[in-house]
Amino acid sequence: MRDTINFREIEWLLELLNKYPRESLRKISQREGIEYYRLKRIYDRYYGKYIFVSAIYDIAKLGLKSYIAFLSVPKGEIFEVGKEMLKNPFISYINPIFGFKNGIQAILHVPVEQEKYVPELLSKYSDDFEYYEVWSRDPSKVKFGKWSYSYEYAILLDTFKVDARTPMKELEKKLSKGRPTIKFMIEKLIKDGIIVGFYAFIENAKEAHDRSVVGIAKELDKEEIYRAFKEEEINIGILRPRGYYVEWFFSSREDIGSKILEFSQYVDKIGIAYLDMFRELNNKHMRTRFSRMIKEDGSGYKSILEF
């Protein structure tokens, strides 16, 4: 029950797991001087239900480019089209959106050698769409890698995205590998720069951001945005060949009209994304995304058009 949650305990555990994302509870208790059974009691109560640890990947090192797409889809067909889109593992996640496009917003992770097929892919779901190459950092400094791992690495990437604290016994079962081999695989992904970190986060324990204001701007003063909205959660992406993608997160309990008025002065196009409508489907989709993208012989990516 939600009213039994102790938020001080949750925040305490969150801080510990951000400091020690993959260490055992024994090691955490020893390093922090915490009584083990107290830590285990709190961990068993909250981890996997309210607190999760996920891996952070550098997809460019895997030869993938990130795109954001906006598709016009009739309101009555959004769920049907959305479910069809999530059959394709190269579509990372989707949200319904209403504004400069009424339909679906999607993030795509596309192999560099297949980027020419993006328009054909999107045309399977809509006759009216626009898309942009989007980056979280300066794209001129990025060097693309390629997939050069066995198929088991794709399963490991899926597993760590959902739960980076998955027990070794479960990893042994999933990967059909022994503990030394799995440790080598994890270390290799870290050494190769594929896994760039881990982060702990809270879900289901407090009011979630279930809406976002999505904007596209030709010009943007990022420092001004951060100053003006220092209390807000904001993502800013760089678009190629020009422009910026901005996303402000908020709760549906807040006034949508005032959010649009507040943010519209900074962008040229604006819309509202509904983050909760496909949440369960997106989470299920994420559990097997890499293992559906990669050929089972490990030789590389499947075609983005075959799904």
Image: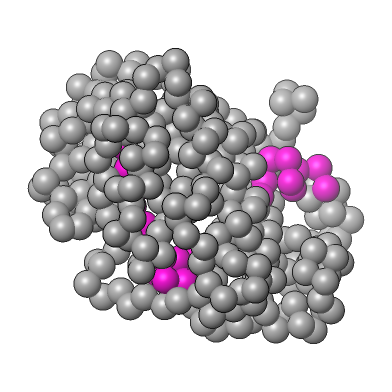
Task: Find out whether residue 65 is within the magenta segment.
Answer: yes
Between residues 185 and 41, which one lies in front from this camera angle? Answer: 185
- In the rendered image, the residue lying farthest to the right is 37
**Left or right placement of residue 126 versus residue 1 in this view:** left
Where is residue 98? Give x, y as percent: 32, 23
- In the rendered image, the residue lying farthest to the left is 219
Residue 68 seen: no
Residue 248: which quarter of the image?
Answer: top left
Task: Find out whether residue 221 is within the magenta segment.
Answer: no
Protein image colouring: one colour
Q: Which residues are magenta?
A: 44-70
**Left or right placement of residue 195 versus residue 8 in this view:** left
Residue 114: which quarter of the image?
Answer: bottom left
Where is residue 77? Give x, y as percent: 45, 21
Up the image or down, 126 lies above or below 38; here it is above
- The structure residue drawn at horizontal position 32% and vertical position 60%, both measured from the top left corner, is 115
Up the image or down, 289 lies above or below 140; here it is above
Where is residue 63? Give x, y as percent: 42, 71
Residue 190: which quarter of the image?
Answer: bottom right
Residue 99 seen: yes
- The structure residue drawn at horizontal position 83% and vertical position 48%, both measured from the top left corner, is 44
**Left or right placement of residue 36 versus residue 200 in this view:** right
- The structure residue drawn at horizontal position 26% and vertical position 75%, both measured from the top left corner, is 141
